[in-house]
Amino acid sequence: GQNIDQPTEMTATEGAIVQINCTYQTSGFNGLFWYQQHAGEAPTFLSYNVLDGLEEKGRFSSFLSRSKGYSYLLLKELQMKDSASYLCAVRDKDYQLIWGAGTKLIIKP
Amino acid sequence: DGGITQSPKYLFRKEGQNVTLSCEQNLNHDAMYWYRQDPGQGLRLIYYSQIVNDFQKGDIAEGYSVSREKKESFPLTVTSAQKNPTAFYLCASSMLGGADTQYFGPGTRLTVL
């Protein structure tokens, strides 16, 4: 079967750095997405990785290792508004998105 | 302003009633999707459509139906055959089919009493 694993919940301090991990086992690989979702709202696109390495976009960076089936989302200079769930999704060989259950990130002052 | 709209935001229905959730996009996207989100689970694909007048079942299509008569619109009907319909429903669209980033509407929270 296909599987995406993420930690259920993480806590971090305002101004700090946090890394949210995602491991996957899928039928083929055609890219990995990270989305942010505030409670009761729509997921919003954060990043996309299809090649190994780090993609940086402002305070957010995403890393991919295809050989290890592993990605992480790095959030720097945390702000209270970063409190949200972060969803990892992998596009499989049929170009269908397989979604993780999401990681709820709690930011404390 | 381009985007995806879903209405209503909250919907309450009695058990045994069919209900239709609206999804409209003005992004000129070809592909549209319906997902269901339940607490502690990843998004699950209900139906998707890559072109007008064509759609395919996702992983959990039983008890749901869709139509795609216009490029902009992809309504979802939750029928009385759906055993556990209470959930947060999300509509998404993408420029092409699976080879493009999906963008989401604000969602409809359906509660069946």
Image (spheres, coloured by chain):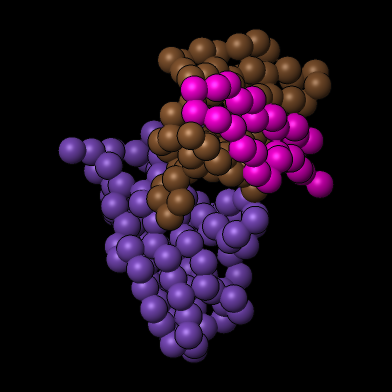
Chain colours: A brown, B purple
Q: Is residue A64 magenta?
A: no
Q: Quadrant of residue A95?
A: top right
Q: Is residue A46 visible?
A: no
In the image, residue B48 sits, relative to residue A99, either above or below, namely below
Residue B51 pos. (x, y %): 41, 46
In the image, residue B37 sits, relative to residue A10, either above or below, namely below
The residue at 48%/62% (across/down) is: B88
Q: Is residue A2 magenta?
A: yes
Q: Quadrant of residue B45?
A: bottom right
Residue B53 pos. (x, y %): 39, 55
The total number of labels drawn is 0
In the image, residue B88 sits, relative to residue A22, either above or below, namely below
Residue B64 pos. (x, y %): 52, 70
Residue in front for this viewpoint, B25 or A37: A37
The residue at 68%/45% (across/down) is: A8
Residue sitting farthest toward the front: A109
The residue at 44%/87% (across/down) is: B14
Q: Is residue A53 visible?
A: yes
Q: Which residues are magenta?
A: A1-27
